[in-house]
Amino acid sequence: MSTKKSLRSADPYREREMSQYAEPLPSREYILMLLEQEGVPVTVEKLERMLDIHSTEREIFSRRLRAMERDGQLMRNRKNALCLPAKMDLVTARIEAHADGFGFAVRDEGENDIYLSPREMERVLHGDRVMVRVTGTDSRGRQEGVIVEVLEHVNRHLVARLAEEHGVLFAIAENRRIHQDILVAPGQQGAAKPGQIVMVELLNQPSRQSEPVARVTEVLGHYADPGMEVEIALRKHDLPHVFSPAVEAAATSLPTEVQPADLAGRTDLRNLPLVTIDGETARDFDDAVYAERMENGFRLIVAIADVSHYVQPNDALDQEAYQRGNSVYFPRRVIPMLPEALSNGLCSLNPRVDRLCMACDMHVSPEGQVRQYQFYPAVMHSQARLTYTEVAAILAAPQSPPGERRDLVPHLLMLESVFRAFLVARQQRGAIDFSSSETRMNFNEFGKIESIEPVERNDAHRLIEECMLAANVCAANFLDSHHQATLFRIHAPPAPERLQAVRDFLGEFGLHLAGADKPKAADYAQLVQRIAHRPDQRLLETVLLRSLQQAQYSPEKIGHFGLAYEAYAHFTSPIRRYPDLLVHRAIRAVLSHTTYTPSSAWKEIGLHCSQTERRADEATREVESWLKCFFMKDRVGEVFSGSISSVTHFGLFVALDDVYVEGLIHISELGSDYFHHDPARHQLLGERTGERYRLGDRVKVKLVRVDMETLKIDFIPATDEAPPIKPSRTRKKRS
């Protein structure tokens, strides 16, 4: 007995377990260590004896073992003995399915993905966690594998289109990575009819012997109903979009106006002509600005809505905001991070009402350098709600503004002076400034696109952007200098393999990216200036942009490559971004001489907020694609001009000039030749003819197909006189 006790007490993680559990069990790490030392499969009974697991502990110990199996740390063999997956040449992975039926096992360890054949994919759905054994290498040099065990089925509810064939009802998932047809159990369709969009709950997961089975839980409507594209995206991407009663109650319990007691300890800025400048359709106003001339420079105040005063750590509002991570902006509809009572009311810097704010008060030099700054809680009174278009017009003709704006002209001109100073600093800093184009969808009364038009980014946009950048940099510097942990907005330098690829590509144009193995943003910026106004500017900028990594949130201060900042944080939008709310709390903690520590680890929060940001981007892109497909479906047969926006091994994506829609020319439509994809040169090259299609090339195309189910738009070269291809009325079996 003493030997068993000493074995259990030797757990190196025993203190951690004791701090977390009233009756601590052997840690996961120690269990794995013992199994490793044994070197052979071990029965549960033997492991219990080794660790002196008493009868009262067996149930919770069994739960721990099951959890370890679920996480892929353990598995059982046919004799029910516990085994280490690594000893059995098994890897734990997440399924990434392809719409064509095959898939990949994405390893937890981050090594190369493992190819899974369509047959292997029959028993799993996209996102499931599995145990895989590598069986060999395919003709393309990829590792192939087989699924040994499904650890976790993650899909419980899916948005799908109800269909019927030979009297059998089935649901086709809107997520094209869910390629199996889902049978609807007899009598479980409710009031749903074939052709409608529905929510289904999976009753049986797929297996080698059977397809998944589900029941209909909600009827959303017909795919062409106004707003249906958003309803589908919300459910497909698991976007929280309904506030719980607890959250609504928390919001309505707050006052509708600033209370006298709220003013204690705040600087009164209500006498300053702070104004908000936003887009025409904005309803939540995070930021207000004010500038005045000072000796040797300017005073710039960026006042940000003080959401942290109302949303307290771990309350219902905070928990909901964390889950959402950010507001999601669809065309014509916003899914806010906070209830409307806060996002458009109490926290929004609406005109002519008192609002609580957190101010970043800066002294800016004539050269655009922030020499001094301070943060403080304040109360403000916005003098006007201005739009970018309105401010740009005033700055262009300050002598003739609308009557009600006349008093604001000197203040707007002062803001413009600060902006011009910031532009000088931006150039000296070497921030990358790619040319960009945005579009706006105009809708008819039925909620469908009537036209798509470009949006000009004027100096008012850039003015506000530079003011916000300055405040965000001050926030990062303030927290870093006070050793207060926070979430930085980081943008890593380009990866070596991307850097080499872009250098090889530029070399063909006689261009060179300076900086050797570690280029700076200034090196990119100088090259962008050199290629400005070239006929191939769009091509070159696109390649440069694609060489950069994606920005994300992290507690590690690695800087922002694109903006050329050593430290950068998001401070200016706490109404619509959760990281900004955390930055406000951290600043308040420093001001009160305390330390802010969130309930979860900073790294975990950063990963979560980066994921919710990507989720929102994917959902909004999908909605825009649906709307564009619906807009184009009646224009089959028309000819358009455009540019090649992307080159792949299966064809060319073309962005149309006048309607700002993108579609595919399949490689089979390019002519009687073998075309080879050269990813380094971003081109398809004809083997016999030498005909080349390259990123950025100008083309004329004919629209031949719009598929609303797959959201695909197909073109052919306009010289091809083949008749338009009509979408098939019969459903293709997806295997």
Image (cartoon, rainbow, N blue to C red):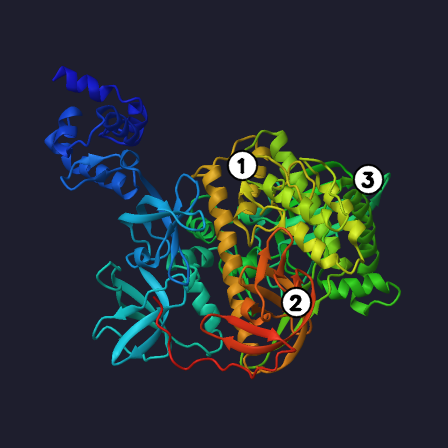
Q: Give the x, y percent position of residue 477.
A: 65, 35
Q: Is residue 181 above or below residue 410?
A: below
Three-letter amino acid code at the position of disc 3? Ser
Tell me which numbered mark, 1 or 2, is placed earlier along the sequence: 2
Residue at the right extreme, as displayed: 399
**Front residue of 300 and 548:** 548
- Residue on which the image places disc 3: 365
- How far is mark 1 from mark 2, CA to CA? 34 Å
**Front residue of 158 and 569:** 158
Q: Is residue 220 above or below residue 30?
A: below
- How far is mark 3 from mark 2, CA to CA? 35 Å
* SS state under label 1: loop
- How far is mark 3 from mark 1, CA to CA? 30 Å
- Give the label, 1 or 2, closer to the camera: 2
The reply to whether callout 1 and callout 2 are in contact (CB within 8 Å) is no
Residue at 59%, 71% in the rendered image:
671
Residue at 15%, 34% in the rendered image:
44
Q: Give the x, y percent position of residue 384.
A: 71, 61
- Residue on which the image places disc 1: 555
